[in-house]
Amino acid sequence: MADVAERAGVSTMTVSRALKKGGSISEKTRGKIMAAVDELGYVLDQMAGTLSSKRSGFVAALVPSINSSNFADTARGITEAIEGSGLQLLLGYTDYQIEKEERLVESMLMRRPEGIIVTGGRHTDRTRKLLEAAGIPVIETWDVPDKPIEHVVGFSNAAAMNALVHHLHGRGYRNIGFIGGTSNRDTRGADRRQGYIQAIEQLALPRGRVISFGKPPISMEQGAQAIVHLVSQWPDVDAAVCVSDLSAFGALMECHRRGWAVPGRIAIAGFGDFEVARCAYPSITTVSVDAKEIGRAAGNLLLRAIEAQRSQQQIPPEMMLMPFVVIPRESS
Amino acid sequence: MADVAERAGVSTMTVSRALKKGGSISEKTRGKIMAAVDELGYVLDQMAGTLSSKRSGFVAALVPSINSSNFADTARGITEAIEGSGLQLLLGYTDYQIEKEERLVESMLMRRPEGIIVTGGRHTDRTRKLLEAAGIPVIETWDVPDKPIEHVVGFSNAAAMNALVHHLHGRGYRNIGFIGGTSNRDTRGADRRQGYIQAIEQLALPRGRVISFGKPPISMEQGAQAIVHLVSQWPDVDAAVCVSDLSAFGALMECHRRGWAVPGRIAIAGFGDFEVARCAYPSITTVSVDAKEIGRAAGNLLLRAIEAQRSQQQIPPEMMLMPFVVIPRESS
DNA sequence: CTGTTAGCGCCTTCAT
DNA sequence: ATGAAGGCGCTAACAG
């Protein structure tokens, strides 16, 4: 910057102002400075700027996986929301492991983000402590934690799955099985199973028809294997709800392959409203949650919180409940 | 850090050493320091460290989209490769637009990454200039540019698609159509189309059977619409190759829906070996490129280049050609 | 509109 | 194994 300043015949401070938006600079000197910048191929060092201005210019977001189109959509929503605000998104993948989340939170905080968005409401104690002590706005998404850290943008996975089971019951299905991953690493998956079990009990339907298969995120292939297990173990099942559309799709294709009519022999339903569920033949009944909208809402809320903080204020903790909708399709 | 130092009764320098790996510190003082760190909830400020050490500790990667499992896999591969090296990945999405890529490159460079990975070989002039002047290792992926900036980890999309068409020809298909996106924003898509056209000419098959539909990334739904157009426009087509597995899947499901036997009435092939192609019924013939391996290879190459640079050396530009394989499946 | 002064929080280098 | 001095590149705050 000193080189640029010298070449343009001004001080470094003037260069600094010329490179920001709000700087009050005569068009003439700005022109000279920009010319010098171009000639020298100068690129501002934002790290140094951060150090002195105390604004890192980025926000952090942690998602379980990026291969799930759900979380990729949320990431896109966040990106859209903060676009134009001068903030950049730093993304991390926890791989559905709260221990990995802890490490990520720590390394993110070392870079001093101005706000952070995490997925889910279950964290290690240390993660909680770190986030609470960070002094920046925190948003939990995709869930409704009992004890939120600060802000929440989510929905109840249990309630959504419960609604789906009730919907199937309304269509006349009575022997409804559940297909999901094994471990409790995926807390949203566990919540969905809980919602299923709850609904089954409310409706007094046959219990225990749960197939757990593979570690999350459960794949299409695992859905295919799971449906075979389900049917062979309880031959009277007339419907299967799956922890996600991916496994539902795998199950559906396996039914095709074996000549089991869907929904004639067995109905299938998924979760998430992925494109594959909409496009499959038959199209798959599912629960739609607007993943991108979750991201957008979280991004906007974060922006507001950061704005407030920059002017020494604070906004009260918000709890935004996002809607979910059961979408009946051909598979049931 | 000064607070921690005071509490532990040492100098800040000793604290700094205690928080790194290589620091020579007695176990006793390290213990005292760590205790102070915990009590105060201190988190190292990496920005300040960057400024004085000239090592930002991260690498940048730009991909066209994160919703495509292909690029998500590549991102995962990069992450895996650099894991444990103390480097973090900063990811950006260009949305298939080289103008957006330019803006992203600029804002990434302001954060002084130690290396950068970009997708494709087509960039704006300014992007090229910025990357060349940045003084850090640069890797182009997913393509084989005529004039690489520095390193390359990719494959020829045209050659891969060409091989797929030849494979279909070998199976007896003669009226082969192509389904892809419209704009030339997606240069990999354009290359694939080029490979298709080239193969058609080499094999002296009926030409011109190209349906362009929607802007990239072309969706399942658009694949479904495209296959209808293709068949109605050239009723004698006996095979359709699609720019990606997603559109191929959409096309396949539409065929189901309309009662067109696949491959009896029309064969279908995709590109990319997505899970949905493997799992669909019938399973979809495709070209497999190991997206994650591209990421892993690029990440490892970048690590080597960064290592070299840190010790004032340099490695010669590398050109890693990744293999692709035609995978015959039920759909052809 | 422009310049001066004084750090931001850490690490490099050199000394002990 | 530890400490002291100085500076990384920029910007806040205050002058003019």
Image (cartoon, coloured by chain):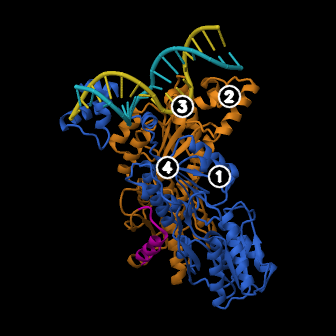
Chain colours: A orange, B blue, C cyan, D yellow
Classify A100 as above or below B26: below
Task: Give the chain letter at badge 1.
Answer: B
Instruction: Give percent across and percent down for residue B303.
Output: 44, 55
Q: Secondary structure at mark 1?
A: helix
Q: Secondary structure at mark 3?
A: helix
Looking at the rendered structure, whether the residues under marks 4 and 3 are on a common chain is answered as: no
- C-alpha span from label 3 to label 1: 25 Å
Q: Nearer the viewer, mark 2 or mark 3?
A: 2
Looking at the rendered structure, whether the residues under marks 1 and 4 are on a common chain is answered as: yes
Residue at the image position 78 percent from the left and 74 percent from the top: B229
Q: Secondary structure at mark 2?
A: helix
Q: Name the residue tied to disc 3.
A: A49
Residue at the image position 62 percent from the left and 44 percent from the top: B106
Residue at the image position 65 percent from the left and 52 percent from the top: B128
Q: Which residues are magenta?
A: A216-231
Q: Determine whether label 1 and label 4 are within 8 Å by CB.
A: no
Task: Classify 10 Å Cα crowding around label 2: few (below 14), some (14-19), many (20 and above).
Answer: many
The numbered disc on residue A8 is: 2
Classify A321 as above or below A315: below
Task: Give the chain letter at badge 4.
Answer: B
Task: Classify 10 Å Cα crowding around label 1: few (below 14), some (14-19), many (20 and above).
Answer: some
Between A185 and A24, which is closer to the camera in this rendering? A24
Task: Classify 10 Å Cα crowding around label 3: few (below 14), some (14-19), many (20 and above).
Answer: some
Instruction: Give percent across and percent down for residue B296.
Output: 46, 62
The numbered disc on residue B59 is: 4
Q: Nearer the viewer, mark 1 or mark 4?
A: 1
Can the viewer see residue B308 in this picture? yes
For badge 1, the amino acid type reads: Arg
Q: Earlier in the sequence, mark 1 or mark 4?
A: 4
Looking at the rendered structure, whether the residues under marks 3 and 1 are on a common chain is answered as: no
